[in-house]
Image (cartoon, grey):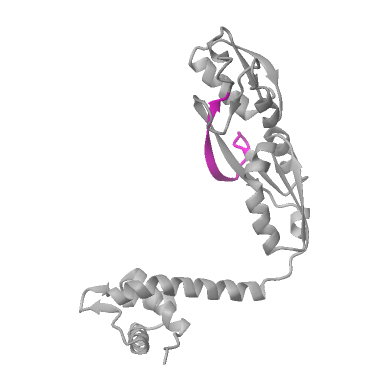
Amino acid sequence: MVPQLDLDLLRTFIAAAESMSFAKAAAAVRRSPPAVSMQIQRLEGQLGKKLFERDTRNLALTGAGETLLSHARRLLRLHDEAVAAIHRPEVAGRVTIGAPDDYVSSLLPPALKAFSARFPRVEIEVMCAQSTALAPMLAANEIDLAFISRMRGVSGELLRLEPMVWVGDAASEAWTRKPVPVALYEPRSTARRHAVKALDSAGIAYRARYTSPSLLGLIASSRPGWPSPPSPPARHRRAPSSSALRTAFRPSRRSRSC
């Protein structure tokens, strides 16, 4: 007969395995050390395997204990997720998310898919604009969440760092001209500031021949005979600077209603 594992015993086992101490495990599961010892013995009895090597001072997992630990963690995680899903309050409403076009295409699809699956009754509106335009909208509670480039005065959670590179048509060799023709984001853009700083630091003379608030516009400008734009995706020559992606959240009346 296949033994039926007791989740309560598994919680105690995990606490003991992670702390390597019955006394510390007892504090974690709010039981006495003798009760923890008895629970481990019960679990060993159910499985017919010794889970710990123990003496008066040391505690170590056996091979069977190491095997059980990974499975026990998954079992308890699934159990807790199932209970949370059943008791989760029904969430409905509207959430407005802001992001530049390049973040919308690269970052949002998997996040929106997961969010929609978890909260199917929440309507999502995506506001596509540059970070410099989204930051004041976030501060004014006009949007609930923003994926924006890191900038002064805006706090949030750092998601990832992206190296900036210069992208251009290899046949045109625009980077060999003096001054170098470049395509840049709009003047207040964080990415533009990094790009210009990199050019100045390298002592490279340049002239802005094309300006766009859109990454798609900058990529279009890299066609033969057009200037070279800086871009987050690693495609050609790396520029000596980097940009950071940050998501910032501020509570708002709209987010509370969801």
Q: Position of residue 167 (x, y in %)?
A: 57, 24
Q: Position of residue 209 (x, y in %)?
A: 68, 14
Q: In the picture, residue 73 is in which quadrant? A: bottom left
Judge whether residue 216 is colored magenta.
Answer: no
Which quadrant: the N terminus? Answer: bottom left
Q: Residue at x 32, y 77 (%)?
A: 22
Whether residue 15 is visible, yes or no, is no
Front residue (pair 251, 169): 169
Work out which residue is located at the far front of the displayed protein and give it. 171
Q: Position of residue 114 (x, y in %)?
A: 65, 58
Judge whether residue 157 is colored magenta.
Answer: yes
Whether residue 227 is visible, yes or no, is yes
Magenta stretch, residue numbers: 149-167
Q: Position of residue 181 (x, y in %)?
A: 62, 13
112 left or right of 235 in image: right
Q: Residue at x 62, y 24 (%)?
A: 192
Front residue (pair 143, 164): 164
125 left or right of 233 in image: right
Work out which residue is located at the far left of the displayed protein and give it. 56
Q: Residue at x 42, y 83 (%)?
A: 9
Front residue (pair 105, 139): 105
Relative to 227, say whether 179 is above or below.
above
Relative to 93, say whether 125 is above or below.
above
Relative to 182, say whether 55 is above or below.
below
Relative to 104, say whether 221 is above or below.
above
Q: In the picture, residue 128 is in which quadrant? A: top right
